[in-house]
């Protein structure tokens, strides 16, 4: 089945160029020229990937990203003319999966979209299994996480981070290893994005956040231990 891509971009020429490239690759494309229209389409259409500009009229990209991530784990690629690390970290904190800085090659954007969708399909594909450690259950067939039989909502990167740590239980993973596995080897942003996501993940895990241990000057590891009420 062809994938559905929602492109939210206020520069009409760029929007049409991206549309042409994705249609040629047999994607179904929904187009929006502002944040409000983008959210209206997202709420009514079945979307597999969102390509989202930051500087949008009516509702900016930050707000759109936050809204989408609160409702869905659909992958998001953010487009921006801002190359500063702080802006990228903000996007990742809000749940973005990839960043593409303008100006960019449509072919490169297409390749990133293809790879991102492939990674999502692999998680939902033949390697389906359930991982249960310390009453934290990851159901990879349903792409969800349960704690003590109660489902918790995680952004894509938080889900990938937790899966990586639990898969490598009791093993110390450096920030560089985590960055390569979760963000990809082509990510060139600030390594502090790992610490930021660890902090958010611990908070969502509540008292079981203590399973994610900081190893000074080494990295992080997942270890099932007795937790106190407060994290």
Image: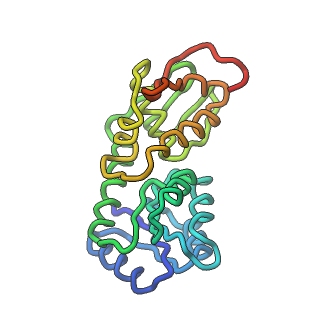
Q: Is residue 23 visible?
A: yes
Left or right side of 214 for 206:
right
Q: How many marks?
A: 0
Q: Eyeballing the image, is 191 above or below 95?
A: above
Q: Residue furthest top?
A: 226
Left or right side of 37 for 108:
left
Q: Residue furthest right?
A: 229
Quadrant assignment, res 173: top left
Left or right side of 76 for 123:
left
User: How are the residues colored?
Assistant: rainbow
Q: Residue at (52%, 67%) from the top-left corner?
A: 45
In the picture, the quarter occupied by the N terminus is bottom left
The picture places residue 106, in percent across and down from the top left corner, at: 30, 72
Q: Residue at (53%, 24%) from the top-left corner?
A: 213
In the picture, the quarter occupied by the C terminus is top right
Q: Residue at (39%, 48%) from the top-left corner?
A: 120
Q: Residue furthest front?
A: 217
Q: Eyeballing the image, is 15 above or below 73?
A: below
Q: Is residue 130 visible?
A: no
The picture places residue 224, in percent across and down from the top left corner, at: 53, 17
Left or right side of 135 for 180:
left
Q: Eyeballing the image, is 87 above or below 171?
A: below
In this view of the protein, which residue sits in the foreground, 197 or 4? 197
In this view of the protein, which residue sits in the foreground, 155 or 179? 179
The picture places residue 70, in percent across and down from the top left corner, at: 62, 53
The picture places residue 11, in percent across and down from the top left corner, at: 46, 83
In this view of the protein, which residue sits in the foreground, 224 or 40? 224
Quadrant assignment, res 170: top left
Quadrant assignment, res 67: bottom right
């Amino acid at each position: 089945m062809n994938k559905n891509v929602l492109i939210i971009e206020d520069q009409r020429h760029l929007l049409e160029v991206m549309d042409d490239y994705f249609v040629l690759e047999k994607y179904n494309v929904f187009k929006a020229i502002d944040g409000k229209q983008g959210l209206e389409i997202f709420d009514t259409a079945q979307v597999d990937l969102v390509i989202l500009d930051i500087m949008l009229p009516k509702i900016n990209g930050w707000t759109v990203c936050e809204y989408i991530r609160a409702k869905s784990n659909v992958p998001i690629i953010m487009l921006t003319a801002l190359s500063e690390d702080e802006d990228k970290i903000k996007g990742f904190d809000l749940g973005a999966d990839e960043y593409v800085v303008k100006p960019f090659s449509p072919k490169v954007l297409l390749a990133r979209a293809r790879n991102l969708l492939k990674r999502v399909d692999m998680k939902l594909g033949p390697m389906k299994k359930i991982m249960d450690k310390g009453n934290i259950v990851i159901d990879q067939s349903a792409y969800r996480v349960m704690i003590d039989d109660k489902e918790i909502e995680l952004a894509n990167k938080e889900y990938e981070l937790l899966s990586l740590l639990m898969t490598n239980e009791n093993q110390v993973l450096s920030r560089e290893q985590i960055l390569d596995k979760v963000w990809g080897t082509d990510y060139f942003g600030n390594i502090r994005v790992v610490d930021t996501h660890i902090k958010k993940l611990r908070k969502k895990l509540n008292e079981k956040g203590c399973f994610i241990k900081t190893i000074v000057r080494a990295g992080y590891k997942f270890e099932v231990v007795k937790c106190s009420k407060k994290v």
